[in-house]
Image (tube, helix red, strand yellow):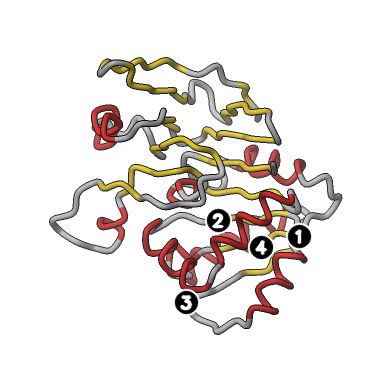
Amino acid sequence: MGRIVAIGGGTLDVIEPLNRYALNLTGVEKPKVLFIPTASRDNAKYINDFNDHFKKLNVEIKTLEFTKKDYSEAEIDALLEWMDLAYIGGGNTIFMMNLWHDHGFDKKLKTVFANDSAVILGQGSGAVCLFACGYSNSTYVDGKTDWQYIWADNLLDLHHTAVCPHYGEEDRTNFDVRLLEKEIPGFGLEDNTAFVQIGEHTEFLGCVKNAKAFYLIYLNGQMLKKEISMKYVF
């Protein structure tokens, strides 16, 4: 089993301690970071902001832009072999997974995890893909006016749990009820929190005071919900 860091959300400047933590997990002095902004449809401003922010973190950066470039399988494999950390950006999780499936990229990331050849980090909607299913606003991201939250299913399932990013925002509270539709536990990850898995070890990190995460499970139709003990990094 490999290493994953799933960040519930937040701006790059605020979640920098979580990003630094993930970079340190690589064990490399100058980590090679592959930014994967597929969920944003490779938004140019997002890519520029990411590069500007990470320049100061002593890393090398390359970007995989599936919506703008045609990659051969050999080129994709070379990027995955090059990287020490895959950074999956936010946006439309369902769009991202569909495109990855067309390229077989979802299977390649599962192999990275299985071989523990790099740290895999997801942020916001990009974190959702690391789990079995996620509470998603992908139709909102697509600009629909009659959107509603839906389940993003058939994800990477690197940790067999449902997840809700940006948990604690008013419009996310229905996750507690909708989890009854699934037969697995759920994590509610607020902004500025992260779920971390290193092999069999798991823990939760926060980078601002009072950032919280929650564990939810239905037993005999009754929901049990508890706040998760958090370690803080600043």
Give the mark nearer the N terminus: 1 vs 2.
1
**Amino acid type for the residue under numbered disc 3:** Thr
**Amino acid type for the residue under numbered disc 1:** Lys
Label 2 Cα neighbours within 10 Å, binned few <14 / some 14-19 / many ≥20:
many
Label 3 Cα neighbours within 10 Å, binned few <14 / some 14-19 / many ≥20:
some
Name of the residue lying farthest toward the left? 146
User: x and y percent of residue 2 in the render?
Assistant: 69, 43
Give residue 34's mark: 4
Distance from disc 1 to disc 2, alpha carbons, whole Å, reads 14 Å
Distance from disc 2 to disc 4, alpha carbons, whole Å, reads 8 Å
Distance from disc 2 to disc 3, alpha carbons, whole Å, reads 14 Å
The residue depicted at 62 percent of the width and 62 percent of the height is 108
Q: Which residue is mark 1?
A: 32
The residue depicted at 26 percent of the width and 56 percent of the height is 140
User: Cβ–Cβ below 8 Å for labels 1 and 3?
Assistant: no
User: Cβ–Cβ below 8 Å for labels 2 and 3?
Assistant: no
User: x and y percent of residue 136 in the render?
Assistant: 33, 47
Q: Nearer the viewer, residue 81 or 92?
A: 81
Give the mark nearer the N terminus: 2 vs 3.
3
Q: Which residue is mark 2?
A: 88
Q: Secondary structure at mark 2?
A: strand
User: x and y percent of residue 166 in the render?
Assistant: 39, 38
Q: Is residue 164 left or right of residue 31?
A: left
Q: Which residue is mark 3?
A: 67
Q: Is residue 224 above or below residue 233?
A: above
Give the mark nearer the N terminus: 1 vs 3.
1
Distance from disc 4 to disc 1, alpha carbons, whole Å, reads 7 Å
**Amino acid type for the residue under numbered disc 2:** Ile
Q: Quadrant of the N terminus?
A: top right
Q: Nearer the viewer, residue 234 or 27?
A: 27
Q: Is residue 86 left or right of residue 69?
A: right
User: Cβ–Cβ below 8 Å for labels 4 and 1?
Assistant: yes
